[in-house]
């Protein structure tokens, strides 16, 4: 069958992936793969309704005090209508040569916690090597939801009890899409501050959608206590997916999707369905033209998150969509050396979805889109994207999907590199084996996750993504999905 064909790709796939059959030396600046393999698999027993043998939607961070210590996190046994049984946490002490993993305890009822499900894991390191894990916690039996933060002081091998940045039990309010970032600049007045962003979905008492602004709280004591909530944009806006960056002087730049005041609910857009809308809610992915919407904006805070500037548009169609697949939130990162900021996204019209990057030095004026991907032809779409940068070199990771009519098709993970601050990108390199979407989790379509992970330190580039393949011979599961990773020397 297709999944077991020889490793040599057909000419059609080679063109789609932006490669050629001719042998050639790698251009200067091409990363070298040090390790590639499985990072984690399902750690916790599945529960009624969860998808057996699925791990999905990973994030990764690297320890700034030890480049060989990285932590990756992911959904552990995904539910089709939102969340997972718990979160799987993996860690490496040898630069990705080997990974250990285990389920996170104390957050869901599966392992001694108070909530039904966990979702949207994100991990970040502080400058002193302490790791923080942000998790969305949800109940599908009542209206409770929360944004929890856990702490690891041993490089991801163990985690504290959850500390709650925000909790809600009102049926008119639902926490969603969290992201966490730490101020690691010693020249910042807020050095060490932990910022927790999320999207509160607001409803009327009858359950009608009102708005979904971008919210933030911060902590100066490792998450023990938190500030009051500040809003990045108007509380009446329909928005989603904060991707914050912190400049060396402590200025925060948040980037996010925003449909404006009175806009359509993000759950009307495939991939943006809130995980905790209502008991028994189902995430759907209605067919639509690729990138018929997806305006990305930026806003600036020079007051430690307390107040925010007016929004500035980054791009007007920066939300990717691969038909039949739920995926494809945009990503952002700041180069700690040059201070240039990058937003990577899939944008296009019709039936192809190229990868682009826009950049800015001050978040007030953003560049025109710079093309990253190659071989962007009809029927070729991109699945998820992440970006990291350092000292003028920019790395963009994404999946290239082909043959969608064959039970969802196949995805090849790829990496494109720019050595001129994001102006031009070399032909991509392919990483890891093909992913067969037929065996991926389902969530309103084939589900490789709404995001993937990338982390960069001097001499180390870590990439993680969901990889699905045919279940083992003795398995009774229709799924087989793990987190795959690659460590490169940039």
Image (spheres, rainbow, N blue to C red):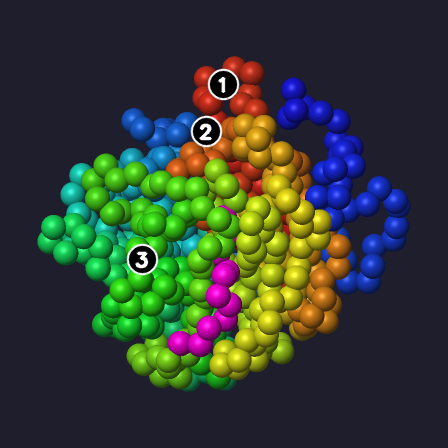
Disc nearest the viewer among 2 and 3:
3
Residue projecting furthest to the left: 205
The CA span between labels 2 and 3 is: 35 Å
Residue projecting furthest to the top: 474
Task: Report whether 47 appears left or right of 140.
Answer: right
Q: Is mark 3 on a helix, strand or loop?
A: loop
Q: Is residue 260 above or below residue 249?
A: above
Main SS category, magenta section: loop
What residue is at 63 percent from the left and 38 percent from the top?
402
Asked whether the beta carbons under mark 2 and mark 3 sit within 8 Å of each other, the answer is no
Disc nearest the viewer among 1 and 3:
3
How far from the left and from the top, in percent, is residue 109? 25, 38
Q: How many marks?
A: 3
Q: In this view, does 117 lie above or below 339?
A: above
Asked whether the beta carbons under mark 2 and mark 1 sit within 8 Å of each other, the answer is yes
* Sequence order check, earlier mark of 1 and 3: 3
Nearer to me, 231 or 372: 372
Task: Report whether 111 appears left or right of 123.
Answer: left
> The C terminus is located in which quarter?
bottom right
Question: For residue 53, which numbered disc appears in the image?
Answer: 2
Nearer to me, 421 or 94: 421
Residue bearing mark 1: 475
Q: Which residues fall within the magenta stretch?
A: 311-321
Residue bearing mark 3: 264
């Amino acid at each position: 069958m297709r999944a077991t064909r020889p490793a040599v790709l057909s000419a059609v796939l080679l063109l789609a992936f932006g490669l050629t059959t001719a042998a050639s030396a790698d251009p200067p600046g091409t990363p070298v793969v040090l390790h590639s393999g499985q990072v984690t698999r399902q750690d916790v027993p599945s529960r009624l309704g969860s998808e057996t043998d699925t791990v999905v939607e990973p994030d990764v961070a690297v320890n700034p005090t030890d480049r060989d210590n990285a932590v990756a996190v992911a959904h552990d046994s995904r539910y089709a209508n939102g969340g997972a049984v718990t979160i799987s946490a993996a860690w490496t002490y040898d630069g990705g040569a080997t990974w250990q993993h285990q389920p996170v305890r104390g957050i869901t009822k599966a392992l001694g916690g108070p909530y039904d499900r966990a979702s949207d894991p994100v991990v970040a390191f502080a400058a002193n090597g302490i790791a923080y894990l942000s998790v969305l916690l949800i109940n599908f039996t009542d209206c409770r939801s929360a944004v929890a933060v856990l702490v690891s002081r041993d490089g991801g091998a163990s985690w504290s009890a959850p500390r709650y940045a925000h909790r809600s039990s009102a049926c008119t309010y639902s926490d969603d899409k969290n992201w966490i970032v730490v101020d690691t600049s010693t020249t910042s007045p807020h050095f060490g501050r932990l910022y927790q962003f999320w999207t509160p979905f607001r409803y009327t008492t009858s359950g009608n959608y009102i708005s979904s602004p971008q919210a933030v709280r911060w902590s100066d004591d490792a998450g023990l206590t938190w500030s009051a909530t500040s809003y990045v944009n108007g509380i009446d806006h329909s928005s989603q997916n904060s991707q914050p960056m912190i400049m060396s002087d402590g200025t925060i730049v948040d980037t996010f999707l925003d449909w404006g005041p009175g806009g359509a609910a993000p759950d009307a857009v495939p991939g943006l369905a809130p995980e905790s809308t209502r008991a028994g809610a189902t995430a759907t992915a209605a067919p639509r033209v690729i990138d018929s919407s997806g305006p990305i904006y930026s806003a600036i805070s020079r007051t430690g998150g307390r107040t925010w500037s007016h929004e500035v548009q980054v791009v007007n169609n920066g939300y990717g969509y691969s038909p039949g697949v739920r995926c494809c939130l945009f990503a952002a990162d700041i180069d700690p050396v040059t201070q240039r900021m990058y937003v990577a996204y899939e944008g296009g019209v019709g039936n192809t979805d190229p990868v682009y990057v826009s950049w800015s030095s001050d978040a007030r004026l953003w560049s025109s889109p710079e093309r990253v991907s190659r071989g962007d032809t009809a029927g070729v779409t991109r699945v998820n994207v992440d970006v990291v940068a350092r000292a003028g070199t920019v790395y963009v990771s994404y999946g290239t999907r082909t043959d969608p009519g064959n039970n969802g098709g196949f995805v090849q993970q790829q990496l494109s590199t720019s050595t001129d601050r994001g102006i031009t990108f070399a032909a991509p390199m392919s990483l890891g084996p093909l992913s067969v979407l037929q065996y991926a989790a389902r969530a309103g379509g084939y589900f490789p996750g709404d995001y993937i992970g990338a982390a960069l330190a001097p001499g180390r580039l870590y990439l993680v993504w969901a990889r699905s393949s045919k279940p083992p011979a003795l398995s009774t599961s229709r799924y087989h999905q793990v987190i795959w990773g690659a460590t490169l020397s940039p």
